[in-house]
């Protein structure tokens, strides 16, 4: 889990029956940025996926794992010093076999940085 080391949840708001907006703040001093990339830190894509999953686990009070990533588009790089606050919009649909379809997008300020469509399974 990355929570409390890599990022801090700031707020969550229900925007629909199965939709939420979550705000988090990145820790720009985390060691991962020393290697990704020295002098020009960038939020790793895999960490973005983990943050989304952890936020969804908290909202759904369930342990989840990615079963399939249908599409994932990284639209802009996130420098944790310049733009430490992220807004994630998460919407889910319950599927058969304890699976969840997730539509997610992320913004920082006026800039979109990720669009994700994935299937997650409850553990």
Image: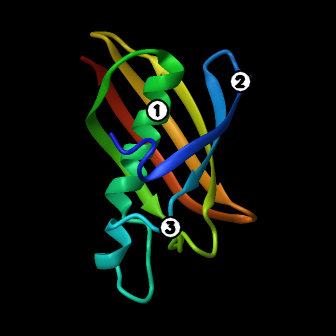
Q: Secondary structure at mark 3?
A: loop
Q: Residues within 10 Å of mark 3 (few under 14, many from 20)?
A: many
Residue at the (32%, 25%) spot, across then down: 64
Residue beneath label 1, please? Answer: 102
Residue at the (35%, 81%) spot, across then down: 37
Residue at the (46%, 41%) spot, across then down: 52
Q: Residues within 10 Å of mark 2 (few under 14, many from 20)?
A: some
**Marks 1/2: CA–CA distance:** 15 Å
**Considering only vertical position in the picture, is 50 above or below 80?**
above
**Marks 3/2: CA–CA distance:** 28 Å
Asked whether the beta carbons under mark 1 and mark 3 sit within 8 Å of each other, the answer is no
From the image, state whether disc 3 or disc 2 is nearer to you: 3
- Quarter residue 96 falls in: top left
Residue beneath label 3, please? Answer: 28
- Quarter residue 15 falls in: top right
Q: Can you tell which mark lies on residue 14?
A: 2
**Marks 1/3: CA–CA distance:** 27 Å
Q: Secondary structure at mark 2?
A: strand
Q: Can you tell which mark lies on residue 22?
A: none
**Considering only vertical position in the picture, is 96 above or below 66?**
above
**Considering only vertical position in the picture, is 43 above or below 114?**
below
Which quadrant holds the N terminus? top left
Residue 101 vs residue 114: left or right?
A: left
Residue at the (27%, 10%) spot, across then down: 97
Residue 93 vs residue 122: left or right?
A: right
Residue 113 point in image, percent of width and height: 56, 63
Looking at the picture, tell me which residue is in the foreground, 2 or 20. Answer: 2
Residue 106 vs residue 53: left or right?
A: right
Earlier residue among tags 1 and 3: 3
From the image, state whether disc 1 or disc 2 is nearer to you: 2
Q: Give the colour scheme of this rendering.
A: rainbow
Earlier residue among tags 3 and 2: 2
């Amino acid at each position: 889990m990355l929570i409390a080391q890599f990022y801090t949840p700031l707020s969550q708001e229900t925007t629909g029956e199965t939709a939420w907006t979550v705000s988090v703040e990145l820790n720009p001093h985390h060691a991962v940025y020393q290697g990704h990339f020295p002098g020009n830190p960038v939020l790793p894509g895999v960490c973005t996926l983990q943050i989304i999953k952890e936020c969804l686990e908290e909202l759904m009070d369930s342990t989840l794992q990615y079963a399939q990533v249908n599409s994932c588009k990284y639209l802009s790089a996130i420098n944790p010093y310049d733009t430490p606050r992220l807004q994630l919009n998460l919407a889910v649909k319950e599927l058969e076999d304890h699976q969840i379809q997730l539509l997610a997008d992320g913004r920082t300020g006026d800039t979109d940085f990720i669009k994700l469509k994935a299937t997650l399974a409850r553990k």
